Image (cartoon, rainbow, N blue to C red):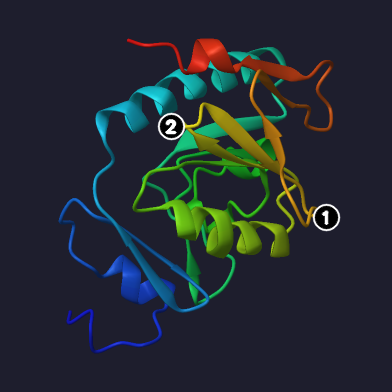
Amino acid sequence: MDMVAHAYYTADMVRALPNDGNRYETVFGELLVTPAPKAWHQEVLRRLSRVVEHYLDRYPVGHPFNSPADISWSDDVLVQPDLFVVDIGEAKTMDWARMKTLLLAVEILSPTTARHDRFTKRKLYQDVGIPTYWIVDPDAQSVEVWTVEDRFPTVCTETVEWKPGGAGEPLVVDLADLFRPL
């Protein structure tokens, strides 16, 4: 498929693109292409995924997934958050098409994704009602926290918290530990 020939991408068009090591997404028809992530990105993702999974073992209100994924709310949207938590009822279907209620979405910044993560995807996640969106910046060792109503993020540099409905206590992530050297 010639990627230059299309000015407006649908989710089905993106699904048909080659498996060439890039991540392909579309948000309201805009094609987002990112190369394979760097090792540090993957390490931060692994650490954060373990913390979120352990938390959800104690408070099973949702189920965590990592990309690649196939999350879509319309014909012209298909995204693959780095880490996301799906409502437990929808997660149990094990069907991407039925997973619409994300309780948390997390993107880990890299130079090639920063614009899309901070603007395009953030606006989409707010529009579809994801209650909490984290933009993890390993270089700045911080996390931007966005909610549906926010016009500006809360920037966390020591800890970041998340408390989904039905959980007994919040998840608290120590950012010094998350960003510690290997």
Q: Give the total number of marks visible in the rendering.
A: 2
Answer few, some or many: residues within 10 Å of disc 1's Cα (few below 14, many 20 plus, some between 14 and 19): few
Q: In the depicted view, which residue is nearer to us: 39 or 69?
A: 39
Question: What whole-number distance in Å separates the C-alpha atoms at marks 2 and 1?
Answer: 27 Å
* Quadrant in which the N terminus appears: bottom left
Give the side of residue 58 with respect to residue 181, left or right. Answer: right
Q: Quadrant of residue 52?
A: top right
Residue 32 to residue 141: above or below? below
Residue under the image location 52 percent in, 10 percent down: 177
Residue that badge 2 annotates: 139
- The disc at residue 149 is 1
Residue 100 to residue 169: above or below? below
* Quadrant in which the C terminus appears: top left
Please tell me which of labels 2 and 1 falls first in the chain.
2
Give the side of residue 37 with respect to residue 138, left or right. Answer: left
- The disc at residue 54 is none
Residue under the image location 66 percent in, 32 percent down: 62
The amino acid at mark 1 is Glu
